[in-house]
Image (tube, rainbow, N blue to C red):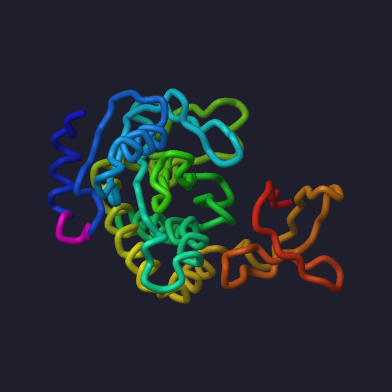
Amino acid sequence: MTLPDDLAAAIERARPRLGRLASTVLFFETIGSTNDMAAERRAKALAERSEGLVVVADQQTSGRGRRGHTWFSPAGFGLYVSVVLAPATARTDPARATTLLTLAVGVALAEGIEQATGLRVDLKWPNDLQVSRRKLGGILAESSGAGDRSDTVVVGYGINVQTQAFPPELRDRATSLESELGRTIGRHHLLAETLVALSRRYEDLLAGRFDAILDAWRRLAPAASGARVEWTTNAGASTGVTVGIDDLGALLVRIDDRVERIVSGEVVWI
């Protein structure tokens, strides 16, 4: 669990900009899921403050995304990270801070990737990082369960870094930083800059600077307005055109003469 020298050095160089994050960083060559390990460590530290704990892995054997999807996580290919955050401790409107957490993390990762690599990244509601409509990364936020800390959330993120053959079902839908840029990317520098950006946007969240997060998300999410989408409800499949997000981060979709508010579920961009 000792950090490799390059990761340790990158974290130390970034330390003045990390705020309350990364006081403890755990590294694993192979792990089932960084989210599961972060949740386990959080559960064992009930009497301690686990906020800011970071878990990093070189490989995940049971990586997962939203709604039970598998996250492709081979050794050396991507950046696989989980962070323990406590949005419920926000000074202004903790419930809203918790609701906007995934959007805030998306903004932070897009900003951190651009800072580290120069690549502009788009956001797709609610938790995807994209380049030219191909998936570059994703976010999975999981609240604490029974017997765990009630004021913390484990936020996992995966970013495809190296050029490597994707499984057949992902080849047309996924991309990586090195594929887009045509050069090698140092994962240690990428880790440090994404954590720095996350620290900055997390402080916005805790201070109630919600408009700053929402405005940044809207700038980074061109498909949140004017795109045709399809989703399934209890009443069946529906289609409409996106018209942005509201102040709680719900996706707004126009269907004929009404606007529907989507807060969860599988949304497909047509």
Q: Residue 31: horizontal and vertical position, in percent?
A: 36, 25
- Depth check: 144 or 211 in front? 144
> In the rendered image of this protein, does residue 64 appear above or below residue 138?
above
The dominant secondary structure in magenta is: helix
Location of the N terminus by quadrant is: top left
Image quadrant in which you'd find residue 167: top right
Query: Does residue 23 belong to the magenta stretch?
Result: no
The residue depicted at 36 percent of the width and 58 percent of the height is 114
Q: Residue 37: horizontal and vertical position, in percent?
A: 36, 32
Describe residue 32's horizontal placement relative to residue 28 as left or right: right
- Depth check: 77 or 82 in front? 82
- The count of marks equals 0
- Depth check: 261 or 8 in front? 261
> In the rendered image of this protein, does residue 182 appear above or below residue 59?
below
Describe residue 170's horizontal placement relative to residue 58 as left or right: right
Q: Which residues are magenta?
A: 15-19
Q: Residue 122: horizontal and vertical position, in percent?
A: 51, 58
Describe residue 252's horizontal placement relative to residue 111 as left or right: right
The residue depicted at 40 percent of the width and 55 percent of the height is 109
Q: Residue 60: horizontal and vertical position, in percent?
A: 40, 27
The residue depicted at 40 percent of the width and 53 percent of the height is 151
- Depth check: 84 or 44 in front? 44
The residue depicted at 69 percent of the width and 66 percent of the height is 252
